[in-house]
Image: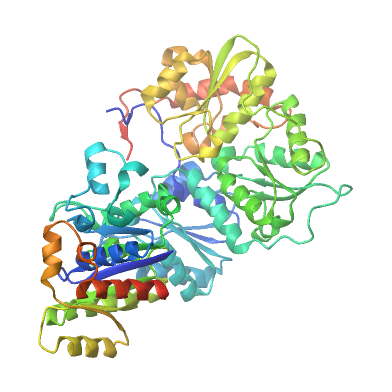
Amino acid sequence: MRQAQRVLSTYSVDIFGICSALYELGGLVVIHDASGCNSTYTTHNEPRWYDVPSMVYLSGLNEVDTIYGNDGRLIRDIKEVADETHPKFISVGGSPMPNVVGTDFHAVARLTERATGVPTLGFRTDGIHSYLQGAGEAFLAFAKRFMKPPTGGNSSGSSPLRVNLIGATPLDFSVTGTVTELKRLIRDNGMELVSTWAMGDTAETLASSGRADVNVVISSTGYPLAKWMKETCGIPYVTGFPVGEKAVGLWIRKILSAGGRLPESGIAEDPKGDGAGTILIIGEPVAARSLGEAASLLGKYREIRFLCPITDAPEELTRGMMITDDEHVIRDACRRADRIIADPIYGRLLPGEREKFIFLPHDAFSGRYYRDQHPVFAGPDAVRNILDAQKDLVVSERENKIEPASPVIFRA
Amino acid sequence: MKKIAIYGKGGIGKSTTTSNLAAALADMGQKVIQIGCDPKADSTLNLLQGKKIQPVMDYYREHDEAPDFEHVGVTGYGGIYCIETGGPTPGLGCAGRGIIATFDLLEELEVFERIQPDIVLYDVLGDVVCGGFAAPIREGYAEKVLIVTSGEKMALYAADNINRAVLNFADRGYASVGGLILNRRNVENEYERVKAFADERNLPVVADIPRSGDITRFEDQGMTVVAGDPDLPVSRKYRELAEKLMEE
């Protein structure tokens, strides 16, 4: 029973990461599955669903088509919808069922493109890997297909440094203003924001992002694309976002240094404070390190520990972190820490020690439950915002609490 | 890196052909990976002195987790890296899924990147009964299919089915059939029958392997005939095929 999740939730899966990454880009995004998946995505993982129009479709896979591997109906249905909606592109991936019968989504994409004449991206998904892989692959596939090659070289010292923010989805940042704050910081500090992958920009804007001087990876979902753009276009990247006033200056400095506008900033990779206690930060690795930097700058903690519960997060971003999704191990790690920053659901691991927790909701983990109390967790006011949100989050967590008699969720 | 999938009717000699081809390629100095894609997991027996290796799927079943790089395969004759997908007992589970799961694991462990083979040979169960058995010819896997057949009616019937299946997959960007390997069973007018079949489908007969007791003799000793006696006429045929494949 070591793998049973009794208290914790599970992270959003790969196909939802794809939907979230491509949501605003004018494509027809297809989830190949029986009915049900779409509702989980729209209810919990997609806060834009009721405000921002998008074309996310579910194929309605049935038993006979599964047995026959009948990709033909899927392709015909996509064509019918594409003929009506004229999407800029089509994306197709699936959930566990088509994965089990070995559906070849790359082949389906090829056939769909031939049938519709619309550029089609196929994703090998299984509905078991995390949203980090799905969204990461979606950004990368979109760039490989649509990004224009960079022209004109680096910007000169007198013109603003051109920056892409990569890795923005509501799964990591919700829709409560954090991404907007990051965009503001770039612009207010004399830089040109070329694109944000992918909140608030069109497909055409993203296609022009090859002209940037620096990429800023603000979540693990942006890492594969940043790595690829470095390899293919020579665009350097930095990871992280600023949490708190002091961190903002360091972040801007780090970006300018990467763009050759300032000497190397020499920021330590694993920050440590000189205080007394230990703090444990649980979550997506880029956010965790950014919060760790904030904790370090506060100087209250002797040791800052990181725990990444998303076990398929990019290895390069999780070095030095404990990587586990085992509830018992996570509970022990929480017990050993004096303070913990984590999604409110993690507070249920230690019901008698709730005061140790600083709650920071994560849509990819707790869905819509705490969205109303989600603070802006980047920028100069971020630390205060997070602390100010605690009172409401504690009340909300109490109201949403699932009692121990809840159904046991088994991991695949 | 060349990647070739060997298909054909059950019992026609796919594993024998693949192993001898692998041995001949290894003797030419090529770095070879042979992947048996059959629940019976006996493709690489004669490259490993008759010893069975633990198939990837068996490892999963026994350890409840995937094997690491050190346990995914075993090095056999001539440095050939041998992998068996394995799979469930006949009548249970889903063998095709086993092939897909193994391929996913090989990708995850970056087996090809780490071994850097010159050629990968997929030895696939004769009947393409579900999507899993077509996995070796998907985009990114084998580019070419060779079909092993004799002049017997049922072997040619199976070869025709395989050829049709591969043609059906052409739109998907899958592999194409590179030719037939005639593995003789001493049927009357055998070459002519197979040649006529090949011509009708515009396919070449890339090798004509004679029926030979030497194959069985060396297999009884847990080795390929190519390794046992490279100068025998039958071994020379395998070596000629290996040379032809590397020249293309």
Q: In the image, is residue B241 above or below residue A329?
A: below
Residue at screen point 47% across, 34% down:
A366
Q: Nearer the viewer, residue A346 or A319?
A: A319
Q: Nearer the viewer, residue A398 or B112?
A: B112
Image quarter of the C terminus of chain A: top left
| Residue A261 quadrant | top right
Residue A214: % across, % down = 72, 46
Q: In the image, is residue A291 above or below residue A224?
A: above
Residue A85: % across, % down = 54, 68
Residue at screen point 54% across, 41% down:
A171
Q: In the image, is residue B103 above or below residue A397?
A: below
Q: Residue furthest top?
A: A276
Does the rendering let one see residue A122? Answer: yes
> Is A366 left, or right, of B80 in this rendering?
right
Q: In the image, is residue A31 above or below residue A171?
A: below
| Residue A35 quadrant | bottom left
Q: Nearer the viewer, residue B245 or A140?
A: B245
> Is A347 left, or right, of B50 in this rendering?
right
> Is A152 left, or right, of A401 in this rendering?
right
Residue A288: % across, % down = 57, 30
Q: Nearer the viewer, residue B238 or A256?
A: B238
